Image: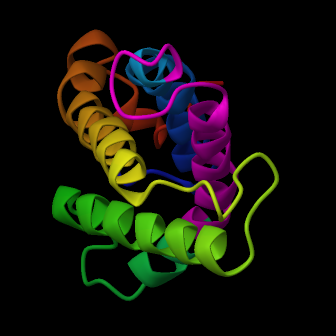
Amino acid sequence: MTPTLFGRWQTRLFLLATVGIVVTMPFFLGLIGTKSGWLFFWILGYIAIFGLIWDILYIYIQQFRWDRDWPGVFQLLGGIWEAVFLVLLVKIFGLPGISKENFDLGTFALHYSLVWVIIYLASQTLLRILFPYWRFRGGQWF
């Protein structure tokens, strides 16, 4: 079954709150990358907030596909677009918690890529194994 808008939102927030936090912790602690601190949780938060808005657009675009489904490769490509959008916002305007002067694109790219790829893999494998009926409820958890 194709995820509903609420299913997409719930799945996105669930994965960011579990897998996203686990992947972000080494960056927060300074074990990976050139910086450490709360910056990485701000990035995770912006991914979540802007992602909720992007999901509305994704559901709309999905209506024009013949099968009304969203292939996994589109999810991966959507992640690239979301990263570009976030980088542009930070570089042009800056965001609360992320100053444009101290923004390290390389560390951001590493953090974002790891979070996005691991969440993508978890959504395509672990969720289907651990929660077999998740997809049949349109991706909704509640």
Q: Position of residue 16 (x, y in %)?
A: 52, 31
Quadrant location of the C terminus in the rendered image: top right
Between residues 121 and 88, which one lies in front from this camera angle? 88
Image side of residue 14 versus residue 94, left or right: left
Magenta-tinted stretch: 28-55
For residue 21, say whether it is visible: yes
18 is within the stretch colored magenta: no
Between residues 126 and 40, which one lies in front from this camera angle? 40
Q: Position of residue 104 (x, y in %)?
A: 46, 54
Between residues 56 and 51, which one lies in front from this camera angle? 51
For residue 70, say whether it is visible: no
Q: Position of residue 94 (x, y in %)?
A: 73, 67
- Indicate the quadrant where residue 121 lies: top left
Q: How many marks?
A: 0
Residue at the (57%, 23%) spot, across then down: 17
Q: Is residue 88 above or below residue 83?
A: below
The image's colouring method is: rainbow
Image side of residue 77 versus residue 40, left or right: left
Residue at the (42%, 49%) spot, across then down: 108
Residue at the (26%, 68%) spot, across then down: 77
Q: Main secondary structure of the magenta part?
A: helix
Residue at the (24%, 42%) spot, across then down: 117
Q: Position of residue 53 (x, y in %)?
A: 67, 65
Between residues 138 and 39, which one lies in front from this camera angle? 39
- Indicate the quadrant where residue 114 lies: top left
Q: Is residue 14 above or below residue 42?
A: above
**Residue that lies at the very extreme toward the right in this rendered image:** 96
Q: Is residue 51 above or below residue 92?
A: above
